[in-house]
Amino acid sequence: MSFLHTLLAFVVALGSLIVIHELGHYWVARLFGVKVLRFSIGMGKVVWSRRCGPDQTEWAVSALPLGGYVKMLDGREQDLGGLAPAELKREFTRQSVWVRIAIVAAGPLANFLVAILLFTGLYMVGIAEPSSKVGASAAGSPAAVAGLHGGDRVVAVNGQAVAVWSELRWQLIQAAVDKNEARLEVERPGAGRYSLLLPAAALTALDLEGDVLGKLGINLGRPPPLVEEVVAGGAGARAGLRKGDLIVAVDGQPVVDGPAFISIVRGAAGRTLNLALRRAGQELQLALTPDAQLDKGPTPVTVGKINVYVAQMPDMITVPSSAPAALHKAVAKVWDTSAMTLKMIGKMIVGEVSWKNVTGPITIADYAGQTARIGVASYLSFIAFISISLGVMNLLPIPVLDGGHLLYYSLEVLTGRPVPERVGEIAQRIGVGLLVTLMVLAVFNDFARLL
C-alpha cells in the first residue's frame, strides 16, 4: 500500500508538471498560428490517441513515461509538398526567430509560473512550520564553538530575517554555496539578543546532502520532557509517573528535551533509572525500570519501554500573508531557488560539490510519497520545487533540451543566419549522450542511497 501511495504521488506530481510544461509550448505555438500536429505525454510509440480541435491535433499517450513533446508542422521533419500556401505559413521554421524563441521558452516559463502560483497560495493560507528555535548543540560542533545554546531562537542570518526552520536552513545553505561566513542574530530567553559567527571554513567544508544543519550542530528545538500521557500498567505507571510531570534529570544528568529522554529510556532496558522531576512546583525523585522489548526493525534490537508519552513537537508558526505580499515572496522564492540550483550545478561541474547531489526518479518518488503523507501543504511545496527544477534543467544550454534550442536561436539573432544543419545534428548527438550519462548517474545515486 505504501508503494502504491508513493507511486501515485510521484505520477501525479511529475505527470502534471510535464503536461503543464508541454501546454506552455502548445498554447504559445497556437497563439502565433503555428500548426500543432501532436501533443504527447510520454515518448516513443503512441499507445493511445485522439484527434480534436480545428487542426485535428493528435492528443496522445506514448509508451515511455519520460517527459513529453509537442510536434509542430516542421519542414525538417515532414514533407511539405502539396501543402497550400496558407498551411505553409503555419510551418515552425518559417516563423521569425523571436516567435520560435517564445514558443521554446514557454515550456520552462510555464513551470516557473506554476511554482509561483503554488507558493503564492501557500503563503496566503500560511504554512505551519517549526520555528527557528534551536536545541542543544553537540560539544565541539561549529554551532557550539560559535556559542549557540539550546533554547536560542535565530532571528536573522547575514541580515536576512528568519522565523521558521526552513528559512534558517535555506540561508545557511546559501552561505555555504557562496563560501561566506554566517552571522547569526539570536534571541536568548532572559538575556536579550546576541550576534554569533559561523566561520566560512565550517560552512564550505559541508557536504550539502542530508541534514545540513545537523552537521553544523544546529538541532531543531524540542520542548522539555513533559509527561503528556501515562498508559496504565506500563513501567512508567508502576514507577509513579503522572501526567504533567516534568523530567528534569536522569541519574543526575540534566535532560534537555523529550527526544533525549526517549533515547535514554530506549537504551536502559531492564536497568533502573533515577529520575529527578518537578510535579506541581515540587521536586521529586522516582526509580524507573524500563521494560525490555524487542524492536523489530531492519536490525532487531532490545530496547527499553515505559508506556509514557512525552512532549516532542517543536514550536510551530503559521504566518499567513496578504495576496501582494504572498506573490512577492513567491517570486523571490522561485528566483532564489533557481539561482541556487544553477550555483549547485556550476559547483558540481568544477568539482566543488559532490555529484552525489544529482538525484533521479527513485529519490523524487520517495520524496513525493513522504510529502504526500505529511500533508497537502508539504506535497504542494514539493511539486513547486520540482517544477522549478524542471524549468531550470530545461533551460540549460544542452542540445535536445529547450535551452539548447534557445542557444541556437540566440546565435541566429547574433549572426543573422541559422545554425548549419550538420552542426545541429552533431550537437544533438552530444546532447543525447550527456542526458543519458546524467540519467545513469542519477539512477546510480538513487540506488546508492537506498543501499
Image (cartoon, rainbow, N blue to C red):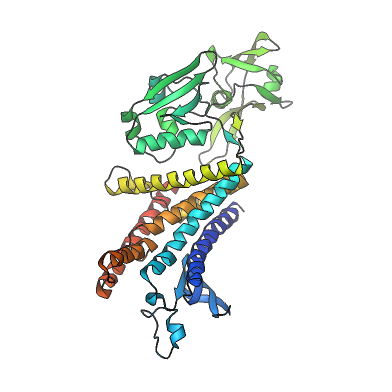
On screen, residue 246 versus residue 411, left or right, reads right
Q: Relative to 308, is 370 above or below? A: below
Kindly give the residue lying farthest to the bottom in the view shown: 82
Q: Is residue 388 above or below residue 195?
A: below
Residue 247 lies left or right of residue 70; in this view the side is right
Q: Position of residue 388 (x, y in %)?
A: 46, 52
Q: Nearer the viewer, residue 186 or 327?
A: 327
Q: Is residue 182 visible?
A: yes
Where in the figure is residue 158, as x and y percent of width and height? 40, 29
Q: Nearer the viewer, residue 43 or 2?
A: 43
- Is residue 205 visible in the rendered image? The answer is no
Q: Nearer the viewer, residue 13 or 405?
A: 405
| Image x and y of residue 204, in percent | 32, 34
Q: Is residue 297 above or below residue 11?
A: above
Residue at coordinates 50% horizontally, 39% vertically from top-left?
A: 299
Given the current orientation, which residue lies at the most extreme right position?
232
Compared with 437, 143 (above or below) is above
Name the residue: 59% across, 24% down: 223
- Quarter location, residue 297: top right
Give me the residue at 42% from left, 64% from top: 102
Residue drawn at the location 39% of the way across and 54% of the way down: 442
Q: Quadrant of the N terminus?
A: bottom right
Q: x%, y% of residue 298? A: 51, 42
Q: How many marks?
A: 0
Which quadrant holds residue 280?
Answer: top right
